[in-house]
Image (spheres, rainbow, N blue to C red):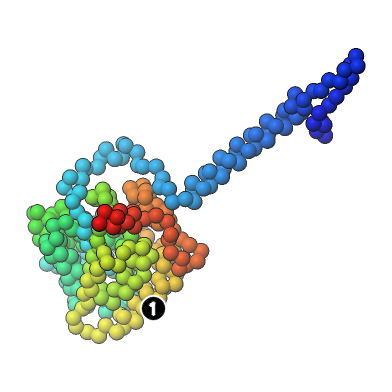
Amino acid sequence: MLPKPVSTYRRHGFTLRRSALLNRSRATNLAVLGLVATLTISLVFNILYLYSDAPPLNPPMSLLASLPDFQHTSNLNHLIIVPGHAIFTGTDPNLRMRVDQWAFQSYQTHQEVLQSSLLEVIFKHISRAARLALQDERSLVIFSGGQTQPTSTTTEGESYLRLALNAGLFESDTFNRATSENHALDSFQNLLFSIARFREYTASYPHKITVVGYEMKRARFKDLHRTAIRWPESKFSYLGIDPLDGDNSRAQDGERQNGYQPYMSDLYGCHTYLANKRIQRNYAARYPPYYLSCPELRPLLGWCPKVNTQLFSGTLPWSAEQKARHGRQ
């Protein structure tokens, strides 16, 4: 039982008061309370930091020292994305129309995707992006897609880049304006990870984005993915190219059922159905590096709201840049 706050006793007719703070048990209790208060404050600050939008620490200098000085890419501001749909396993571009030179998703083998017209449209995506790069000297083409096939040791993005280079689509002065993004497992990651890859390659974020892909996926990219990352519509373009021959109604129905509608109810693709598709495609257990290389994107990269359609509300590099540019005008 704690002593009374103030104790008194009489000696030779005088009343002496002794502070309870000098009492051993009271001092011990105060010390414990002080320690608990300090730990509580520390815990609160750590929780606030973990759940804030503050970026983590920068990568260590030992890693940064191996990077180039970005002088040859620092002027680039236009990101051109080519989402991958298969893996070109060959090296000879003249053989690109042969089915045995490609690795596809398992579900694609049961569709008409193996027809020559659809193999050709993939190359049209690649070549159109290369032509766009020739027209805009401040653009960077990123071929995006991970190692989605167990029968291939390479990635969709790297194979597209290899095909483009071997086919001579990039001239000597544009050779360094094409690269690959090797971790995306779906269309949402094609967009977000390509932005992160642009940041890795140029040390800055793009001012505008052009996606070159299937026309039937325009709404998915423009209405859903762009909205999910809060990229300004005025700085976003989509160039759609579909096969010229054949009836695309079956493919369009598949896009609505397996692409647009699932993303409409799960904007960030991190719940059940869409999350399982990512798991099934990540055969090589690759871990994207962008949490380290793009620390300012870490809150968005890890965003998976309980309410599936809740927009990310934190600070984004491009929203801050847009505000800064608008303020200077």
Q: Residue 131, position in %: x, y?
A: 13, 65
Describe residue 58's horizontal placement relative to residue 134 as left or right.
right
**Residue positioned 29% across, 84% down in the render:** 249
**Residue positioned 49% across, 51% down in the render:** 51
Instruction: Look at the image and tell me whether residue 78 can be seen.
Output: yes
Instruction: Provide the secondary structure element on which disc 1 rests.
Output: helix
Instruction: Looking at this view, name the residue that lies furthest to the left.
Output: 172
Q: Residue 17, position in %: x, y?
A: 81, 23
Image quarter (top left, top right, bottom left or bottom right) of the C terminus? bottom left
Query: Could you say which is closer to the camera, residue 223 or residue 318?
Result: 318
Describe residue 38's horizontal placement relative to residue 202 as left or right.
right
Q: Does 158 appear above or below 223?
A: above
Q: Which amino acid does label 1 sit on?
A: Gln
Q: In which quarter of the image is residue 28?
A: top right
Image quarter (top left, top right, bottom left or bottom right) of the N terminus? top right
Query: Could you say which is closer to the camera, residue 222 or residue 98?
Result: 222
Instruction: Looking at this view, name the residue that lies furthest to the top.
Output: 12
Q: Mark 1 points at which residue?
A: 257
Q: Residue 282, position in %: x, y?
A: 37, 60
Q: Quadrant of residue 173?
A: bottom left
Instruction: Look at the image and tell me whether residue 96 can be seen.
Output: no
Q: Does 26 appear above or below 138?
A: above
**Residue positioned 43% across, 51% down in the render:** 53
Query: Could you say which is closer to the camera, residue 256 or residue 237?
Result: 237
**Residue positioned 65% across, 34% down in the render:** 34
Q: Characterize the local packing of mark 1: few (<14), some (14-19) or many (20 or more) Cα atoms within 10 angstroms.
A: few
Query: Could you say which is closer to the camera, residue 277 or residue 53?
Result: 53
Instruction: Looking at this view, name the residue that lies furthest to the right.
Output: 13
Q: Quadrant of residue 270?
A: bottom left
Q: Does 113 appear above or below 92?
A: below
